[in-house]
């Protein structure tokens, strides 16, 4: 491990070993020698034959950066902590911080426990945690992604996933397609009629959403009336046109219609498998499996909508882990082939009453898992990938292993 310093008053990085020379960052910029001063903040990094790092840039939004002093962003803080303890340097930045050969971003100062402004080199790896689906496709973000691409820096994940686009990709995979609920894109009212004729119950979901936002189900009762149910309300509707008028009028949203799978249950309440996945050496493997069970309603198992956490051990002996391992890797390979560098994702899966497994959703930017063991294992694998992509695998700090396994 080597110690480097950031002089926050004079805004430059340096080391204080007069007998050595070092480079760092994506472009192997020379790190100058300078004696440390009272305004020099120390950081401990690994040494890969004279290159220091890894330097990890986390892409976020202007809003997040402006709120760092008033709000706590648990995921960003957690990743920074693991990178720091593992022997790397992490900084946050947004599109406005990209300059010709440097980035203006934020680093975490442990002496003050505050994020502070810093000028840093282009990093070895960029972790895309831009938080807004809506703004990720704006022209200013497209320009930022193009700038990063021109610097030839690995960036994952490339963007949020669209449910419909992911479905189309997986549907074309020979062994994954049988693990997908029948799904179509909503284009006209007759699509709903068609789905209700084929399936007793269907889900209607916004293609570009997460956490169960906007989701509802439709089914027919014994009298032929349509039953609408969302996480908050239930009602009976006479016509499909009522559904379209009340819920699907927003032309800016893309909606999918999905077969509802008759799910396996715990104590007569359905549950989902929430699977965290990371890539390493070109393969995708499970970092942890969480169980989310519905309680007050059966539409979604998300805890924000009343779902509860069940220990995986409660159903572990009833789950085909070998099959899940294969599906996870095949899904990751399929997405990476079409979308670019995929470093991590989460999958929502369901086991049916017929003991069949279905992929409900794939999410590009997993949030923090409530189960500490899953979150810790996920962070460990995320850091492994940072080191691998940055070219630091051979010098990955032993302190990283000790920190993750004993913290």
Image: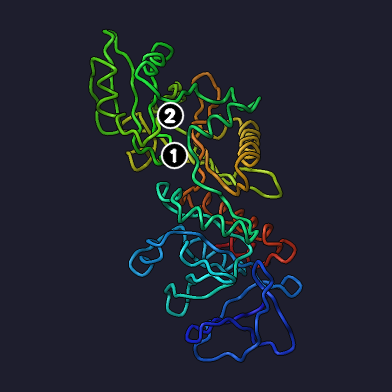
- The picture quadrant where one finds residue 229 is top left
Question: Do labels 2 and 1 touch, CB within 8 Å?
Answer: yes
Residue, x 56% and y 52% (percent of image)?
Answer: 378
Q: SS at mark 2?
A: strand
Q: SS at mark 1?
A: strand
- The picture quadrant where one finds residue 19 is bottom right
Q: Pick the residue in front: 404 or 211.
A: 211
Q: Pick the residue in front: 56 or 84.
A: 56
The quarter of the image holding the N terminus is bottom right
Q: Mark 1 points at which residue?
A: 310
Colouring rule applied to residues: rainbow
Figure check: 107 above or below 77: below
Q: How many tags in the picture?
A: 2
Q: Mark 2 points at which residue?
A: 266
The quarter of the image holding the C terminus is bottom right
Residue, x 44% and y 39% (percent of image)?
Answer: 310
**Residue 116: percent from the left, percent from the top?**
44, 75
Seen in the image, is 192 located left or right of residue 163? left
Figure check: 223 above or below 280: above
Residue, x 59% and y 55% (percent of image)?
Answer: 155
Of the two numbered discs 2 and 1 on the same chain, state the one appearing first in sequence. 2
**Residue 361: percent from the left, percent from the top?**
49, 35
**Residue 68: percent from the left, percent from the top?**
38, 67
The residue carrying pointer 2 sits among few (fewer than 14), some (14 to 19) or many (20 or more) residues within 10 Å by Cα, namely few
Q: Residue furthest top?
A: 223
* Cα distance between the residues tagged 2 and 1: 9 Å
The residue carrying pointer 1 sits among few (fewer than 14), some (14 to 19) or many (20 or more) residues within 10 Å by Cα, namely some
Q: Mark on residue 407?
A: none
Residue, x 59% and y 24% (percent of image)?
Answer: 177
**Residue 166: percent from the left, percent from the top?**
53, 34
């Amino acid at each position: 491990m080597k110690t480097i310093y950031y002089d926050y008053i004079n805004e430059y990085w340096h080391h204080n070993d007069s007998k050595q020379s070092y480079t760092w960052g994506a472009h192997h910029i020379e790190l100058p020698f300078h004696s440390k001063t009272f305004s020099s903040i120390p950081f401990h990094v690994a040494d890969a034959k004279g290159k220091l790092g890894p330097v990890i840039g986390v892409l976020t939004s202007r809003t997040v950066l402006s709120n760092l002093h008033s709000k706590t962003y648990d995921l960003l803080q957690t990743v920074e902590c693991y990178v720091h303890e593992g022997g790397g340097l992490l900084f946050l930045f947004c599109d406005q911080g990209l300059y010709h050969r440097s980035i203006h971003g934020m680093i975490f100062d442990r002496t003050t426990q505050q994020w502070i402004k810093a000028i840093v080199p282009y990093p070895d790896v960029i972790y895309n945690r831009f938080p807004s689906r809506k703004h990720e496709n704006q022209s200013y973000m497209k320009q930022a992604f193009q700038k990063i691409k021109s610097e030839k820096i690995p960036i994952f994940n490339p963007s949020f996933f669209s449910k419909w686009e992911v479905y189309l990709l997986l549907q074309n995979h020979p062994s994954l397609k049988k693990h997908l609920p029948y799904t179509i894109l909503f284009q006209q009212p007759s699509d709903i009629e068609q789905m209700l004729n084929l399936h007793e119950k269907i889900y209607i979901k916004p293609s570009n959403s997460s956490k169960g936002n906007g989701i509802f189900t439709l089914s027919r009762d014994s009298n032929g009336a349509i039953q609408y149910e969302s996480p908050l309300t239930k009602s009976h509707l006479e016509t499909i046109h009522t559904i379209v008028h009340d819920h699907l009028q927003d032309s800016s949203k893309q909606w999918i219609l999905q077969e509802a799978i008759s799910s396996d249950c715990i104590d007569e309440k359905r549950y989902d498998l929430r699977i965290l996945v990371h890539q390493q050496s070109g393969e995708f493997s499970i970092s942890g499996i969480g169980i989310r069970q519905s309680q007050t309603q059966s539409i979604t198992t998300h805890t924000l909508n009343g779902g509860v956490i069940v220990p995986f051990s409660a159903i572990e002996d009833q789950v085909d882990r070998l099959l899940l391992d294969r599906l996870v890797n095949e899904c990751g390979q399929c997405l990476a082939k079409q979308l670019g560098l995929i470093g991590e994702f989460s999958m929502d899966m369901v086991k049916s009453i017929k003991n069949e497994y279905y992929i409900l959703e794939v999410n590009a930017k997993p949030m923090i898992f409530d189960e500490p063991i899953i979150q810790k294992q996920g962070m460990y694998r995320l850091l492994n990938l940072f080191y691998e992509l940055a070219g630091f695998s051979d010098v990955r700090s032993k302190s990283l292993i000790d920190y993750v396994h004993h913290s």
